[in-house]
Amino acid sequence: MSRPRTLYEKLWDAHLIEERADGSSLLLVDRHLINEGTSIEAFASLEARGRAVARPEIHLAVADHAVPTVDRFRPLPPGPRRERIELLQRNCAHFGIEHIPFTSFDQGICHVIAPEQGFILPGLLAVCGDSHTSTLGAFGALGFGIGTTEVEHVLATGTIVQQRSRTLAVEISGTLPRGVTAKDVILTVIGKLGAGGGAGHALEFRGDTIRALPVEARMSICNMAVEAGAKVGMIAPDAQVFRWLQGRRRAPAGALWDRAVAYWRTLVSDPDAEFDRAVTLRAEEIAPQVTWGTSPDQVGPITGVVPGPESFPDTIRAAAARRALDYQQLEPGTPIESIRIDRVFIGSCTNARLSDLRDAADFVRGGRLAPGVEGFVVPGSMQVKAAAEAEGLDAVFRAAGFEWRASGCSMCGGGETAPPGTRVAATSNRNFEHRQGRDVRTHLVSPAMAAAAGIAGHFVDIRKLERAPA
């Protein structure tokens, strides 16, 4: 009888081709997402070596990082962005890879459109030249980001060489308070683990709190597992996931669907499986979160204050806090709620799905951006954009003074930036120095928190607010 295994171990073993003497493993890849940010050099090297693409059917390409989110259908001006978008299309045509044009109704951020189209399914091993491929773990897939050299390896062989990760169970139990979202959950987890606390681990999010979350909320949690240093974030698939996927364009149908679901139901950690580490949280203790520093683990509750460097237990974290406060131009002891903002960015592969836009609209409806505050909303895909427009959400945002844009990575790493010194309430996943522009100060929050801050002009505790009726 085989020993009990975690979900991660089951998926790893199912894709294992061979274990190597150096401790690495050769794994079979089921799905490879390609964008214009990390594939150009890989394609060039492949062509220079005279290599073909192995298993073209496992690859799907879409431009998302460099695409403009305004004037989408106007000709792109000359420059690096246009060059990369055109090179992606040319390379895909040359190597026989399916490519979604950036003007297509199917375009969007790759981590959003892959599940949206049923290209990602439970039990698959999926990779992409982007660290936030961990998003796909929300479907019980083994998803992780790879580098450009690895992109070339996957293109040429349909396989990947990896080191097996240790396992870390993140157990969250209880009922989330009103106004607390999946973004607050994952920021709390990152704050507890630290930016490197999950390094070398695959995180499995478990517990009744996680099981109660809708699928899109689970995607936000797995998306940011990498901000705790982990390679992988995952959640066992269940009936919610199966319902969400059924009928998607690339999902199996008929008898194949029934067979797939029967297999997917086995994709859970065995009851007696042992994790290398475990952390536990109570949902009732989680509050809306706001990052104050320049790393996602420099975070605290909306009711808190900006900490001083002396409050950290070691000199390394104290020095990091000192540098972050200097960059962010914040004083220790400042109440989080008193921090004023200049811009709201609602978008990114973390928080730009339809449910995120609905949450944000609930705190915008009937209001107006505060004087001096600008904001824009960037849906995660063109299909999300169309669905939101069908519900009238675009009109809600526009009436409040927000720009309503086309899909793309935008201010989360897509080249769209803010002027120096701008303070941004962002629903994205990283708040590093200069991430959103030179000397731009970024605070990571949930869509609802970002929207409410835009209306108030400063961060507010949305638990004290009433959602506006639709």
Image (tube, rainbow, N blue to C red):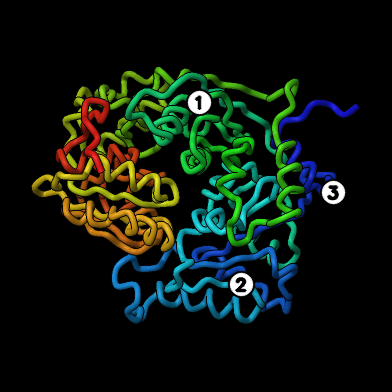
Name the mark nearer the viewer: 1 or 3.
1
Amino acid marked by disc 1: Thr
Name the mark nearer the viewer: 1 or 2.
1
Amino acid marked by disc 3: Glu
Mark 1 and mark 2 lie on one chain; the one further toward the N terminus is 2
Q: Percent position (x, y) of residue 421?
A: 20, 49
Instruction: Decide: few, some or many residues near mark 1? Use Cα within 10 Å; few <14, some 14-19, many ≥20.
Output: many
Vertical comparison of 135 with 157: above or below: above
Mark 1 and mark 3 lie on one chain; the one further toward the N terminus is 3
Q: Percent position (x, y) of residue 222?
A: 53, 40
Amino acid marked by disc 2: Glu
Q: Please state which of residues 313 and 300 is positioned toward the viewer in this rendering.
A: 300
Element under label 2? Answer: strand
| Residue 220 in view | yes
For disc 3, the marked residue is 18
Q: Percent position (x, y) of residue 32?
A: 64, 60
Q: Residue at x 34, y 81 (%)?
A: 75
**Pointer 1 and pointer 3: residues touching (CB < 8 Å)?**
no
For disc 1, the marked residue is 209
Q: Residue at x 15, y 38 (%)?
A: 456
Instruction: Decide: few, some or many residues near mark 2? Use Cα within 10 Å; few <14, some 14-19, many ≥20.
Output: some
Element under label 3? Answer: strand
Which image quarter holds the C terminus?
Answer: top left
Q: Residue at x 46, y 24 (%)?
A: 192
For disc 2, the marked residue is 98
Q: Please state which of residues 223 and 152 is positioned toward the viewer in this rendering.
A: 223
